[in-house]
Image (cartoon, grey):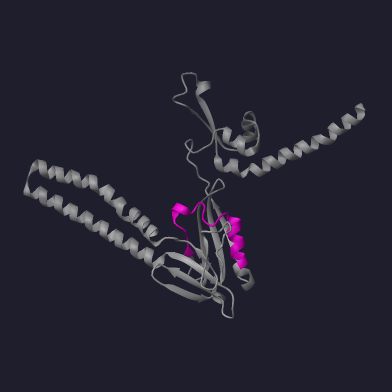
Amino acid sequence: MVTQDSGPLAGAVEPGATGQRLVFVPSRAGELGSVLAVKALAPALVATPLLLLALELAHVENRASYWRLAWVLVWIAVLVVLLRSASALFVALARTVRSVEFRTEGEAPRLVITRFLHSVAVPSAELRFVKVEEQLRVGERRSIKVLLYFDLAAGPVECAPPRSIQSGWGGSTEMLLDWLTGQLGPLRIPVEYEAISQRHFECPEEWWQADRPARLWQVPKSEVAELAARYGVSRAEYLDQDGGKDRSAATITVYDPAQVYDLIERIRADRAAAAGAVDPVVEDAVESAE
């Protein structure tokens, strides 16, 4: 009997019938509710003010033609909402993968892919490789999905948790990769990883002031400008409208977050190497004084 996983992957990994199951959608109702909220409620919220305006115009003019037009618009809006809801539900029911069970023990290891309305068992021998694809923004996860490649021509089976739980789903990426490797390694099925980093940030709204690079680079705030210039970090200056009439006091300098993040390890290593290079000189000076 398979025991409940109580480790860091608990919540993403559950015991299956004869193996471990990787759960992407823990709640059918929750996922369907979120799909309907995006696909149905959003158009309804956009259309409601326009429909109210049409009804108000018909009421003010009090003409039969205006009332007919208003009710036609209402029924068109209702029809659009119903069609989008039905389409969204069909896609969710047909395509969304709720879980994948790895039944890797026994003479015929296989994967059981469970969707909303049905499950299908696929021999593990047909699985070419698995890829974990992660979207990152300055090192923080924005989205993650697991791609199962059975036939390169047909494309992968995409498995992804809902947006509301993606940031913490599966614990750390290293733990998830280790778990997948443990499940598929004995079958010699490779597990790959691809990180896609967001490089574009709106300037100056999303760029960082000096305190953030100072904290990441572990340097005093006063050294950020000099280090940014030395390593070629893009910077911009803008005048804070609330900063007062003195331009020097109101000018704010911001730095490109992607470039700041890329340089974390390099700047720390360079500073550590520079600090280590000074130590022998200090030691020789101390010995000479003695």
Q: Position of residue 24 (x, y in %)?
A: 47, 61
Q: Position of residue 141 (x, y in %)?
A: 53, 50
Where is residue 233, by image quadrant? top right
Q: Is residue 179 magenta?
A: yes
Q: Residue at x 56, y 43 (%)?
A: 258
- In the picture as drawn, the residue positioned furthest to the bottom comes out as 107
- Determine whether 196 is above or below 256 in the image: below
User: Which of 259/130 is in front?
Assistant: 130
Where is residue 35, by image quadrant? bottom left
How many callouts does the rendering have?
0
Residue 187 appears in view = yes
Residue 156 appears in view = no
Where is residue 62, by image quadrant? top left
User: Which of 69/132 is in front?
Assistant: 132
Q: Position of residue 276 (x, y in %)?
A: 78, 38
- Determine whether 256 is above or below 71 in the image: above
Q: Position of residue 146 (x, y in %)?
A: 52, 62
Please give left or right for residue 274 compared with residue 237 in the image: right
Q: Residue at x 56, y 80 (%)?
A: 108
Q: Quadrant of the C terminus?
A: top right
- Determine whether 282 is above or below 266 in the image: above
Task: Report the span colored magenta.
Answer: 158-182
Q: Residue at x 31, y 50 (%)?
A: 42
Q: Is residue 277 magenta?
A: no
Q: Quadrant of the N terminus?
A: bottom right
